[in-house]
Image (cartoon, rainbow, N blue to C red):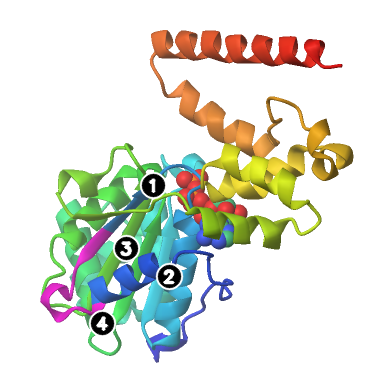
Amino acid sequence: MDYRHLPLRPAATPPIGREADLEFVRSFFDDSAVRGAALLLTGEAGVGKTALLDAVAADAAERGVCVLRAAGVQFEADIAFAGLNQLLVPLFDSFDVLDPLHRDALRVAVGVGSGPAPDRLLTSTAVLLLLRAVAARSPLLLLVDDVPWLDRATTSVLGFVARRLVGSDIGLLAACRSGSDSFFEAGGLTEHRLRPLDEAASATLLSRAHPDVPPSVRRRIAAEARGNPLALVELPAALTREQRTTPAAMPAVLPLTDRLQGLFATRVTSLPAASRELLLLAALRDALAAFDADDDAP
Ligand SMILES: Nc1ncnc2c1ncn2[C@@H]1O[C@H](COP(=O)(O)OP(=O)(O)OP(=O)(O)O)[C@@H](O)[C@H]1O
Ligand SMILES: [Mg+2]
């Protein structure tokens, strides 16, 4: 089997303003001193971690690297090995490169074989052996998004693999929001923090995503979004047609789309009760101030 022709997600359009990050990731894995290494990509919600992973995947595939991808999914977090199943789907037909003991353990773990739950060490070793066999034919890059939402069984196998990559042609790039718990942080692996976009990149993103919005409104959106691409994409979508085209009609507090509300709700619910109360008071104070300002307007 030629692993380089494994199915991939369609190539994404390159993310705006991420040339330096892409270059960092590429050189991290290309540098022979760290060949066979793991890198953790962190950053706030909506900053563009998944968009960067898409770009890394497209770039790697173009260079003949075999890319395997998986992402943690909240509603699969309690299905043991759901993440590993996702990651290894393209290799299901290749388990025969393993000896029968490891092959059968892996088949049971990912749900394509039956039998008693396999030993964790056996499964982890089987994954490592399989990945090494694949990498012997073509360099391999594992991309794992939303690590904290992976099931624990997959998390522990990937942690095991991450610590045994040296000397192989396997790279592992994992992504998670800053501050979330993950096995990589515990392992002290190299971290690359994705920063918000700079002013120029924010302006380019806004003009591409919302060409109908006049520059003065875009400037206000950019100031509120503070370089967060999700906010840059979504904030204009929550405005009425009049607000989008007339700066004077923009409200003092910008409305949020469902996606942005969901994002902030996730952040807020993870805070302690006292912090949530404080946030509520601060939000009410701002909202009342905005209300007063609107009332004073001629
Ligand atoms: N550099 C960029 N250029 C253009 N669009 C971008 C860029 N970065 C992100 N986006 C867009 O912004 C939105 C949010 O990006 P993305 O989903 O990658 O964020 P994230 O960091 O993975 O968020 P989360 O923590 O919720 O997983 C997406 O619609 C994405 O396409
Ligand atoms: Mg993401």
The answer to the question of whether label 2 and label 4 lie on touching residues, with beta carbons closer than 8 A, is no
Residue count near mark 1 (Cα–Cα under 10 Å), binned few <14, some 14–19, many ≥20: some
In this orientation, which residue lies closer to the viewer: 205 or 176?
205
- SS class of the residue under badge 4? helix
Residue at 51 percent across and 47 percent down: it is 227
In this orientation, which residue lies closer to the viewer: 147 or 271?
271
Nearer the viewer's eye, disc 3 or disc 1?
Answer: 1
Of the numbered discs 3 and 1, the one sitting upstream in the chain is: 1
* Residue pointed to by mark 3: 173
Could you give the CA–CA distance between mark 4 and mark 1, rounded to whole angstroms?
29 Å
Considering only vertical position in the picture, is 159 above or below 262? below
- SS class of the residue under badge 1? strand
Residue 291 percent across, percent down from the top left:
73, 12
* Residue pointed to by mark 4: 135
Residue at 80 percent across and 11 percent down: it is 295
Could you give the CA–CA distance between mark 2 and mark 1, rounded to whole angstroms?
16 Å
Q: Residue 187 carries which label?
A: none
Q: Tell whether position 34 is magenta.
A: yes
Residue count near mark 3 (Cα–Cα under 10 Å), binned few <14, some 14–19, many ≥20: many
* Residue pointed to by mark 2: 19
Residue at 60 percent across and 33 percent down: it is 262
Of the numbered discs 2 and 4, the one sitting upstream in the chain is: 2
In the rendered view of the protein, which quadrant contains the C terminus? Answer: top right
Residue at 60 percent across and 15 percent down: it is 286
Type of the residue with mark 3: Leu
Residue count near mark 2 (Cα–Cα under 10 Å), binned few <14, some 14–19, many ≥20: few
In this orientation, which residue lies closer to the viewer: 250 or 33?
250
Mark 1 sits near ligand 1, with its Cβ under 8 Å away: yes
Type of the residue with mark 2: Glu
Stretch of the chain drawn in magenta:
30-39
* Residue pointed to by mark 1: 43
Residue 277 percent across, percent down from the top left:
48, 8
